[in-house]
Image (tube, helix red, strand yellow):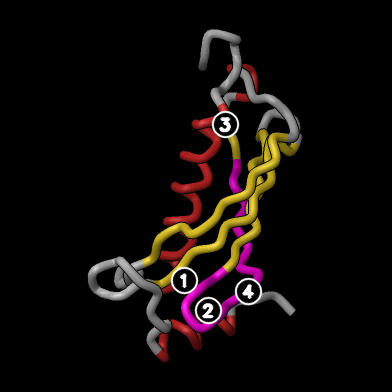
Amino acid sequence: MDGFGHVNNSTYLKYLEEARDQFLTDLLGEAVHRIVIRRIEIDFVSGLTQDDDHVDVEVQLTGVGTSSLTLAERIVSTADGRVAATANTVMVHTDDSRTASAPWPTAARAVLGASIPA
């Protein structure tokens, strides 16, 4: 909670990060590879307060490129089902030094491609 009595907007990014990490670990296993955020776009739809108690974060894979993936995410209050934020995130698989993009390994790309909803 911040001085204005609501969850600070930076905390929304932490919620998204935790859900995104779990989503990718569930999808790709413990060897999640070297992935970094290239871009994140967030719309703050509704403020969260102590009364919201908990949130659910929905993560959906929406695209896979040679070295990137795109996710659509939503933060939803469990108190009343209200959408608190929506986000789109582009992540990039990198080389060993994490200084340049690198193609997805074949197996990871196959799993990612099969996980995009029709």
Q: Are marks 4 and 1 in contact (CB under 8 Å)?
A: no
Specify which label sits upstream in the sequence, 1 or 2: 1
Disc 3, SS: loop
Position of residue 101 in the picture relative to residue 85 (left or right)? left
**How far apart, in angstroms, are the residues tagged by discs 4 and 1?**
14 Å
The residue located at (57%, 29%) in the rendering is 9
Q: Is residue 60 magenta?
A: yes
**How far apart, in angstroms, are the residues tagged by discs 1 and 2?**
8 Å
**How far apart, in angstroms, are the residues tagged by discs 4 and 3?**
29 Å
Residue that numbered label 1 is attached to: 27
- Magenta span: predominant SS is strand
Residue that numbered label 2 is attached to: 112
Which range of residues does the magenta coloring cover? Answer: 56-69
Is 101 rendered above or below residue 74?
below
Residue that numbered label 3 is attached to: 54
Disc 2, SS: helix
Residue that numbered label 4 is attached to: 63
Specify which label sits upstream in the sequence, 2 or 4: 4
Specify which label sits upstream in the sequence, 2 or 3: 3
- Going by the picture, which residue comes out furthest to the bottom? 106
Disc 1, SS: helix
Observer-side mark, 4 or 3, equals 4
Specify which label sits upstream in the sequence, 4 or 1: 1
The residue located at (69%, 35%) in the rendering is 44
Q: Are marks 4 and 3 in contact (CB under 8 Å)?
A: no
Nearest the camera: 79 or 37? 37
x and y, in percent, of residue 15 in the image: 50, 40
